[in-house]
Amino acid sequence: MGKMLIRNVEVLSFEGRKPIFSTGQDLLIEGNQISSIEPTSPILQEDCQVIEASGMLAVPGMLNTHAHVPMVLFRNAGPDVNENDWFNKVIFPLEANLTPKDVYWGAMLGLAEMIAAGITCVADHYFEMDWVAKSVEQAGTRANLGWAVFSHQGYGQLEKTIDFVERWQGKADGRITTWLAPHSPYLCDPDFLVRCAQETARLGIGNHIHASETAGQVTLSLELYGKTPIQMLADTGILDQPSIIAHCLYPTDEDLDLLTGREVGIAQAPKTYLAMAMGLADLPKYLDKGLAVGLATDGVVSSCTLDLFEQMRLTALTQKNKAMDAEVLPVNTVLDLAFQGGARVLRQPRLGNLKAGNLADVVLLRQNRPAVQPVINKAANLIYSLDARDVDTVICDGKLIYQGGRHLTLDLDEIYREVNSRLPRLLNKDLSRKIADYPG
């Protein structure tokens, strides 16, 4: 069992939900977990890989609670469009071109971007997920993977996604978990959602689903079913199992009561909401209910980047602006959401905090740019001044996967070459295509 010592580093950890910054620490990793965090000793450990980290800040690997990672293939393909055109004139026509190998190379590019931004775990909701799983296995990261499915595809396609769940659950040395991923209550009918709930109960897993993303979706659900999307998830049994709900910007007070006390996490991606003029969630209300909330990038066709530093800043700033109150979502709360919140949403209690016994997902941040000096308020500095450019080292499951700006598990030249060779075919739009032409 290998040992790694991160020496003389400043460490961000949490006591409860309160962030603690401790300087001059030695963080010892044995195997895939943190063995100890103690004041720096002048005596070095024997038989141990040493990373000298003076001046750096160690933070937990970040958890991206909702993404469509291979969509990096279409980065910036649909700016300045509203929801209907975004789906019908951008996403549906472009994604109908995808082949399984396209998905693989898109996932490889997206994982490279996330690693360089300090993200060590992602909940990905996409297609051809065997190929995404292979890319995660190669990259050395963690992932909760769900193969998106729609009711119009039928129960045969659902069975295909169940086969994927059983094939990849716990693979890559336990770094991969698999859930079902019915797309949403507006693209999955009630009977289909009931079947998904039954299957997740049988398999002992959860669901990753979009719901209440826009006010229009809530209105449509009420017109069609006399229920909100969240009520639909409750009535069909989806919420009886662990669930990731992407976005959930428009729950009613009754919806929030339905979510309270359940194993439900809500993924928030404010950069997407700003880009598509969707509105914003009332996060203080969610937190007052005790709901698990984590940060997410969503897909890059709407968010442009897979960067949780951006989402962390925007979460703080947009919530203050929405409430017209600068005291809303103070820095300690934002840091808890950014790190431990993601672990709560993804049901990963051994992630999101640096402490002995937790899994060794560690990111080292340089703190020597002019824009991050002087350091007066450490929590505010991490939220508002440090960013993905400051990521120096990434460790996942006790293994170095990125150091000094260099990927150790991925070949960027090969990834860029493969992605760019596919663009002429991928960007060929046929606007007659509809959602039925999605890959499956």
Image (cartoon, rainbow, N blue to C red):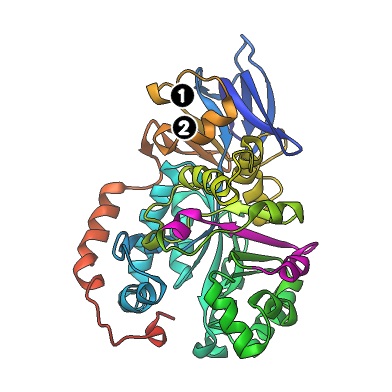
Residue marked by disc 2? 386
- Secondary structure at badge 1 equals loop
Question: Residue at 45% of width from left, 20% of height from top?
Answer: 373
Question: Camera-side residue: 24 or 223?
Answer: 223
**Placement of 341 over or under 272, stated as above or below:** above
Residue marked by disc 1? 367
Q: Which amino acid does label 1 sit on?
A: Gln
Question: Residue at 58% of width from left, 22% of height from top?
Answer: 10
Question: Camera-side residue: 383 or 97?
Answer: 383
As drawn, is 23 to the left or to the right of 14?
left
Does 31 appear in magenta? no
In the rendered structure, are the residues bearing label 1 and label 2 in contact, judged by CB atoms less than 8 Å apart? Answer: yes
**Magenta span:** 251-274
Question: Residue at 52% of width from left, 44% of height from top?
Answer: 317
Does 267 appear in magenta? yes
As drawn, is 404 to the left or to the right of 63?
left
As drawn, is 143 to the left or to the right of 369?
right
Q: Which amino acid does label 2 sit on?
A: Leu
As drawn, is 322 to the left or to the right of 193?
left
Question: Residue at 73% of width from left, 70% of height from top?
Answer: 241
First reached walking from the N terminus: tag 1 or tag 2:
1
Q: Quadrant of the N terminus?
A: top right
Where on the picture, by quarter, is residue 380?
top right
Q: Quadrant of the C terminus?
A: bottom left
Q: Residue furthest top?
A: 42
Q: Residue furthest front?
A: 324
Horizontal and vertical percent for residue 31? 62, 38
Where on the picture, by quarter, is residue 143?
bottom right
Q: How many marks do you count on the picture? A: 2
Q: Residues within 10 Å of mark 2 (few under 14, many from 20)?
A: many
**Placement of 76 over or under 207, stated as above or below:** above
